[in-house]
Image (cartoon, rainbow, N blue to C red):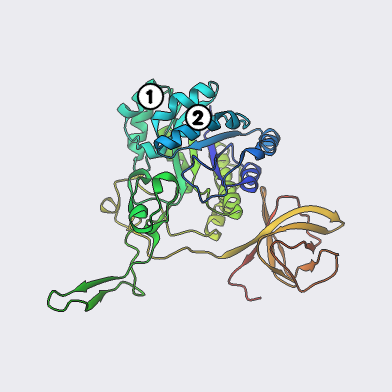
């Protein structure tokens, strides 16, 4: 039986390697000019050799997101950059604008073509049409229920079906939104979304005979998040996705942190392995999802058409901002001396901090009072981001372990 693919996001080199190390079968990434996440770090052509090394090391697949809607100048830029793009070991291209299909397929005849969720493919007739055009896989619109996924798969059994299963949801149809363009002058359809649906809005009434005098309409702390959707989380429903015929589970998050990529990828890796082998432990890794910065979770539209079809309000707008219990501090690198490790530091680590380490197959290791050293291996009060520093511990750490601190713990 062909197992379901786990597909994780990569917004930069570190996240790319982290995604593979923590269990992804495939990773999707964007190039600077053609990705719908232009504010992610993304990738430049001089990084191709390093990316090729990472791909060879882990043996996973690499997908390129070329999913903006192309204006005329964008088409010319794509043609000019095709030769540079060939330096990357891409296995597939994710596109939403079918006008670039022939251009990309002509330059990469061996690569698969995946239809982006931005194309809003949500039924079997559309899926069959895209398959005839030459697409190998469709990434379903996020408004597709499980019952329709099964019907699409039955109608197109040889067409790959990919679905988002975790991460941020968009209130617009498959992300095709103009709010950001109107309110911030930044086009979501060109990869520059300002996430205006997440803003906190204050509403007010102005009475006709009293111009300039406003009467506020408030919710909670004086603002409403009526346009901000809950995050998607389907980790408890992987069997339903499998039974519906989904071939690839996609995690959203090229803009998210390395810690997010690691923790979410690891949790879904364990859950998928448990699906095929019940002896695999996954519950404790599942619980780790709640330690990552997230909004309230929901099951999206997989079980119905939104709030009107639910009794528990699970799909109503998020009432809170991000929920976060841990601060990501950095990544463990080499053991440079016995029990002393170099670091890639993202946030300050203080001497005596209670910190935790997580790894691909290590739920967590705790150091109740860490010893920190400066660049000269001398004891110091703290080490900071972008500064050389080390930690000293008796814990059995490995290169690639991530470091975190519980926010609720007073230092």
Residue designated by label 1: 156
Q: Is residue 371 left or right of residue 135?
A: right
The Cα atoms of the two marked residues, 2 and 1, are separated by 32 Å
Q: Report the front residue among 342 and 162.
A: 342
Q: Mark 2 against mark 1, which lies toward the viewer? A: 2
For the question of whether residue 96 can be seen, the reply is no
Q: Secondary structure at mark 1?
A: loop
Relative height, residue 136 to residue 378 (above, below):
above
On the image, the x and y values in percent for residue 168 come to 44, 52
Q: Are marks 2 and 1 in contact (CB under 8 Å)?
A: no
On the image, the x and y values in percent for residue 86 come to 60, 29
Quadrant the C terminus occupies = bottom right
Q: Residue furthest left?
A: 209
Q: Report the front residue among 27 and 266.
A: 27
Relative height, residue 368 to residue 117 (above, below):
below
The residue sitting at 34% across, 43% down in the picture is 143
For the question of whether residue 358 can be seen, the reply is yes
Residue designated by label 2: 79
Q: Residue furthest right?
A: 338
Q: Secondary structure at mark 2?
A: helix
The residue sitting at 39% across, 22% down in the picture is 133
Relative height, residue 244 to residue 18 (above, below):
above
The residue sitting at 47% across, 63% down in the picture is 322
Compare marks 2 and 1 and give the one earlier in the sequence: 2
On the image, the x and y values in percent for residue 277 come to 58, 38
Name the quadrant containing residue 87.
Answer: top right
Name the quadrant containing residue 147.
Answer: top left
């Amino acid at each position: 039986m062909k197992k379901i693919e786990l597909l994780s996001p990569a917004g930069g080199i570190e996240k790319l390697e982290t995604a593979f190390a923590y269990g992804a079968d495939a990773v999707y990434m964007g190039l600077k000019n053609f990705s719908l996440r232009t504010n992610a770090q993304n990738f430049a052509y001089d990084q191709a050799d390093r990316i090729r090394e990472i791909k060879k090391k882990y043996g996973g697949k690499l997908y390129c997101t070329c999913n903006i809607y192309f204006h005329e100048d964008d088409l010319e830029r794509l043609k000019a950059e095709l030769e540079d793009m060939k330096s990357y070991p891409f296995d597939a291209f994710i596109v939403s604008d079918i006008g670039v299909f022939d251009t990309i397929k002509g330059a990469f005849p061996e690569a698969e073509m995946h239809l982006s969720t931005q194309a809003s493919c949500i039924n079997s007739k559309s899926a069959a049409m895209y398959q005839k055009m030459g697409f190998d896989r469709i990434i379903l619109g996020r408004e597709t229920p499980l019952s329709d996924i099964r019907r699409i798969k039955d109608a197109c059994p040889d067409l790959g079906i990919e679905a988002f299963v975790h991460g941020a949801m968009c209130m617009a149809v498959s992300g095709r939104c103009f709010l950001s363009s109107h309110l911030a002058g930044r086009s979501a359809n060109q990869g520059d979304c300002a996430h205006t649906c997440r803003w906190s809005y204050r509403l007010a009434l102005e009475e006709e005979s009293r111009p300039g005098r406003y009467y506020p309409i408030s919710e909670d702390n004086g603002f409403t998040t009526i346009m901000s959707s809950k995050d998607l989380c389907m980790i408890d429903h992987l069997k339903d996705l499998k039974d519906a015929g989904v071939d690839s589970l996609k995690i959203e998050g090229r803009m998210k942190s390395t810690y997010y990529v690691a923790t979410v990828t690891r949790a879904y890796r364990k859950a998928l392995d448990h699906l095929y082998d019940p002896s695999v432990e996954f519950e404790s890794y599942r619980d780790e999802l709640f330690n990552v910065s997230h909004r309230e979770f929901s099951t999206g539209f997989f079980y119905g058409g939104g709030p009107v079809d639910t009794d528990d309000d699970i799909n109503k707008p998020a009432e809170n901002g991000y929920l976060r219990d841990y601060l990501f501090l950095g990544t463990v690198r080499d053991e440079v001396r016995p029990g002393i490790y170099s670091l890639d530091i993202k946030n300050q680590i203080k001497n005596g901090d209670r910190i935790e380490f997580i790894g691909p197959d290590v739920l967590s290791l705790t150091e109740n009072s860490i010893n920190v050293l400066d660049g000269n291996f001398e004891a110091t009060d703290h080490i900071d981001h972008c500064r050389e520093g080390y930690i000293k511990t008796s814990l059995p750490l490995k290169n690639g372990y991530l470091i975190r601190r519980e926010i609720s713990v007073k230092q």
